[in-house]
Amino acid sequence: MLHTALNLSKHSGLMSQVVTRFAPSPTGYLHIGGARTALFSWAFAKNQGGKMLLRIEDTDRERSTEAAVTALIDGLKWLGLDWDGEPISQFGRAARHAEVARELVAKGHAYYCYSSPAELEQMREEARAAGKPPRYNGYWRDRDQSEAPAGVDPVIRIKAPLSGDIVVNDHVQGQVVFKAENLDDFIIMRSDGTPTYMHAVVVDDHDMGVTHIIRGDDHLTNAARQIIIYNAMDWPVPEMAHIPLIHGPDGAKLSKRHGALGVEAYRQMGYLPEALRNYLARLGWSHGDDEFFSTDQMIEWFSLDALNKGAARFDFVKLENINGHYIRAAEPGYLYDVMLATAREVGRDTDVAGLTANRATVLSALPELQPRAKTVLELIDLAQFIYASRPLSIDAPASALLTPDSRAVLGDMAEILRGLNDWSVPAIDAAMRALAEAKGLKLGKLAQPLRAAMTGRTVSPGIFEVMVLIGRDEAMARLEDQISAV
């Protein structure tokens, strides 16, 4: 549930505690760029012993649904990014936005504008003809309201300064100067009484006591306009850090083909939240040459001044390598739970049943499987040998190993294995080494077709460990299946 009430008594501008905010528009998911913004806002607040607040900018009623809000919140929770207090609905604060807009009019810092769409278009055309930027010309800026046409609902425009500079002192971009003459009297309240984004953001950030704004550098020009409102209301301007957007490997704007997906897509592809946190942190922030670091280390080291000014490039290979690192380091019990949840989410019902029915065996196998996987989906695939139904489905590389000659060798193996009293890794190993020596073969020449017969693949944990994990009866049955296969 989203809330609108705020305790305004705290927001005097004298607060010493750092307060950041993450303010996404609910588009149906938490996209990867937004996730990084949330991560940086969260890490900085944690580093400073402050708070991160969550505001849902849901003023676009067509796109803002409960499902979209839920998807955003679920994405943040999965990434492990918590926030303080209840999520705030921007739409629910429309009355407060209107109140501030009227106050700006009363103070002489804003005014009612009655220009019609046709008049505005004429102003733009005249500006173009004069070689100037097409924009509103300030017609109603100092005009008496008695001249207002009857039956016209006005907008409210801010009175932008006509000269001088507006300076944004930014932790990432440095000092950025905007000429006031290039900024027009932009609308803060539409004729239907709804606030514009530019206005609502300022009011909400002030009322929420936000001290530091971290967001994409596509908002840098917005910052100059928003400072006009802060100054008009005599409110302190929060510190700002405008981070470069994430680009694809080719340097172009990040798109879906590059990885501009929702975080739930990364979860479904088998990435761990701690790996995605680590990778996103490195996309625009660094601590020396450290590639891998825990979340606690990130919080300890994080600073706005270490944010990179250059655009970061998304690289799936690096993400996979980081994910593989976290998979190798994870506890088997944790990974088992993630494997089961992932299989359920992506609709792999056979894997859900197999993992559930063979929990103990999977847990025993995971230390052998973890070094071989870079994603949770790969981990599930590697574990399938434990619960695969007979006869096994043999993939193409494994099938190539099961030649008539190798099937004959499998027959020799089966004869020896039937006579083993001790079904253990050392006993199986010793028996297979003796057979290899007797046939003048290297052990690998026996192990390769044996692995194909036991798992249907060419990659698995140690094949003798596999045979012990699945048990004598299942191992011998799989072997017989391949010996007798045509």
Image (cartoon, rainbow, N blue to C red):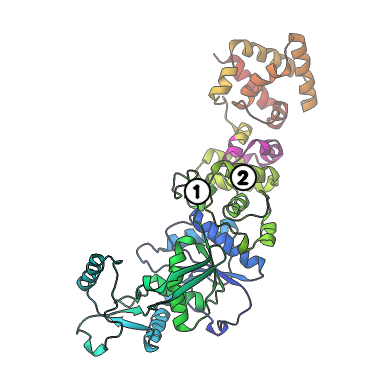
Q: Is residue 366 left or right of residue 65?
A: right
Pointer 2 residue: 323
Does residue 171 show up?
yes
One can see residue 75 in this view: no
What is the three-letter code of the residue carrying label 1? Ala
How many discs appear? 2
- Sort mark 1 into few (<14), some (14-19) or many (20+) by Cα contacts within 10 Å: some
Label 2 sits on what residue type? Asn
Q: Which residues are magenta?
A: 357-381
Q: Is residue 345 left or right of residue 371?
A: left
Q: Which residue is mark 1?
A: 265
- Residue at image x 72%, y 26%? 464
Q: Which mark is residue 54?
A: none
Question: Residue 108: which quarter of the image?
Answer: bottom left
Residue occupying the point 61% across, 47% down: 338
In front of the other: 17 or 112: 112
User: Would residue 126 appear left or right of 37 to someone viewing this image?
Assistant: left
